[in-house]
Image (cartoon, rainbow, N blue to C red):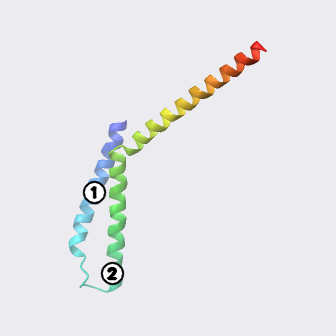
Amino acid sequence: MRKRNKFKHVAYLLLALAMLLYALPQLSPGTGSGFVFAFGIAWCAFAFLVIAAHLHFILGVDEEKAKRLEAVRKAKLNNWQAKWSEEGQASQQS
């Protein structure tokens, strides 16, 4: 299921790149009013955000972060368990 999910993100990334490459040549500061050009710039900014989000997912940045967080959680759990077992042994000896 993970591969299919990444394939979907690759497809959407390529679609966003194609739309951006189609729109960029039609944007020029000399044609139309300032509002048309400002809309084009805003649209391109959103397209770059979409591309960046898909690249972030494809490169697996979240997976690496999740693995590091899981390692921290396991270390904390081990520390708590060691602390509780020490407290339990101390209370039994009393």
Numbered tag placed on residue 15 in the rendering: 1
Q: Position of residue 9 (x, y in %)?
A: 33, 48
Q: Residues within 10 Å of mark 1 (few under 14, many from 20)?
A: few
Mark 1 to mark 2 CA distance (whole Å)? 23 Å
Dot 2 amino acid type? Val
Q: Position of residue 49 (x, y in %)?
A: 37, 61
Rendered-image quadrant of the N terminus = top left
Numbered tag placed on residue 36 in the rendering: 2
N-term mark: 1 or 2: 1
Q: Residue at x 29, y 48 (%)?
A: 10
Taking 1 as reference, is 45 above or below it? Answer: below
Instruction: Check the image and name the residue furthest to the right.
Output: 94
Q: Position of residue 45 (x, y in %)?
A: 35, 67
Q: Position of residue 2 (x, y in %)?
A: 36, 37
Instruction: Check the image and name the residue furthest to the top.
Output: 93
Dot 1 amino acid type? Leu
Taking 1 as reference, is 53 above or below it? Answer: below
Which structural element holds mark 1?
A: helix
Taking 3 as reference, is 47 above or below it? Answer: below
User: Position of 43 compared to 79: left or right?
Assistant: left
